[in-house]
Every structure is written in C-alpha cells, then in structure tokens.
Amino acid sequence: MVRINKDYRNTSSTPPRLPLMSSILSSLKTQSSSITYTVIVPSYRGYWTSTGRPSQSGIEKDMKAIFHHLESYNIPGTEFILWGQSIGCGIALKGWADYLQAPERQMPIRIKGLIMETPFVSVDSMLVAVYPQRWLPYRYLSPFLRNHWDVRGAVKEIAERNAGVDIVTLRAEKDELVTKEEAVEVEGILEQISRGDRHIRRVVITGALHVECVAKVQGRTEVINFLKDIG
C-alpha cells in the first residue's frame, strides 16, 4: 500500500522541508516495514525551481495537473493523504474539491486522510485576524484581494460528495499569524468531512511558531502516529 503525502505551502520553499520529510519517512520505514510510503512535494509556479509567477488561478491549474498525475500512481491498494501547511491547507482542499467535480477523471484516486498544519479559514478572514482594529483600513480590503483560498467553500464542496476522511490538525501554540479563534473555527469547519469515531485529532504543538510544527519533535511524532493509526 502506497500513501502519497502532498505538502503545500506558500511562504515556505521546498528545500527547508525536505529534511523534515526525510525524518518522518525514516521513522515510518523503521516502524512499518510492510508499508511503502511515497512523498510528492510539488513546487508551484514561481516557487523554488518552478517557472512563472504564482497566482490563485495559476496554482489551481497546477493542482489540476497534480491530481491527474496522481492517477498514474493509482494501483490497487493505493491510498492518498493530503498534507497542507498554512495557506497550503486551503490550496490542498480547493484542489481536491475541484478534482471531485472534474468530469474527466480516468482512475479516481481515494483521499484517506488530511494533515493540516496551522490552517486558517481564508485569506479574507486573516485580514480581520491580523488587523482586528476597526480603525485600520487593512481589514476592509478583502474585495481587492487577488487570492482568497476559502477553506469553508472547499470543504462544503467536498462534503456534498460524501468524501469523509481522517484528519489531524496541528496548531502552533505561539502562532504569530493565526489566532487561536481562527484555528478553532477552521477545525470546526473541517468536522464536516471528518469520518468515523476518530473525527478530527486536534493537537497544539508546544512552543511552536507558525512554521515550526513539524520542526518540533512533538509535531513530527503526531504526524507519524496519525499515518500509522489510519493504516
């Protein structure tokens, strides 16, 4: 059985994450020798060695290509896990929602689980979370945003297609970007697509800043245990 974990992120680049992925894979290999784990870490247009400039419409096209590429891995017994970090959670969920609606799916893939690191509801909601002062103009600029990445909308589309998954959310205790209220709200939204008795495992990573969840031993251990538990 092959699990493919996809790591999506916006402000991070691929290279700093690779040692963390390697550490998690090494632990899984030691503890679960009968299972093969494969990680696909795409870099969107404008990131790392990818050409072009990032935009929501462009990244949505990249997501469409990535999901159809995953169909080539879809041999019997294959299960897929989406792994998003920060804004990448919204990207992963929007990509999945669009894929579920795509009429040209040849060998539909099965998403079994979600790993959501420091997710937030949308770029629009983050304007209010980061600038709560009503006298500041920034919180009112959502109509002018070029990117939105609305988790609520994506989850609604996924839920309408009865796509239930196991989910773990990693919240950074000292998150300097996503407020506790925002994190709790997005966890509630994700409940719409949680499955079985496990529902969503909500974990607060002690001492972590926004991009540090899997840099902490606790965070890596939670990811490893999640992957083992849903195996």
Image (cartoon, grey):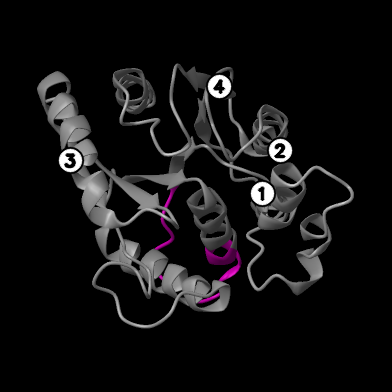
Residue 152 appears in the picture as rendered: yes
Label 1, residues with CA under 10 Å away: few <14, some 14-19, many ≥20: many
The type of residue carrying mark 2 is Ile
Query: Of discs 3 and 2, which sits in the foreground?
Result: 3
**Quadrant of res 40:** bottom left
Residue extending farthest to the right is 135
Query: Of discs 1 and 3, which sits in the foreground?
Result: 3
| Contact? badges 3 and 2 (CB < 8 Å) | no
Residue indicated by mark 3: 19
Residue indicated by mark 4: 202
Q: What element carries label 4?
A: strand
| Contact? badges 1 and 2 (CB < 8 Å) | yes
Label 4, residues with CA under 10 Å away: few <14, some 14-19, many ≥20: some
Q: Is residue 117 left or right of residue 70?
A: right
Residue indicated by mark 2: 189
The span picked out in magenta is 98-110
Residue 105 appears in the picture as rendered: no
Comes first in the chain, label 1 or label 3: 3
Q: What element carries label 2?
A: helix
Residue extending farthest to the bottom is 52
Residue indicated by mark 1: 155
Query: Of discs 4 and 1, which sits in the foreground?
Result: 4
Q: Nearer the viewer, residue 78 or 69?
A: 69
Q: In which quarter of the image is the C terminus?
A: top left
Q: Which of 28 and 208 is in front in this view?
A: 208
Q: How far apart are marks 4 and 1 (CA)?
A: 17 Å
Q: Is mark 1 on a helix, strand or loop?
A: helix
Query: Of discs 3 and 4, which sits in the foreground?
Result: 3
Comes first in the chain, label 4 or label 1: 1
Residue drawn at (55%, 22%), measured in percent from left and top?
A: 202
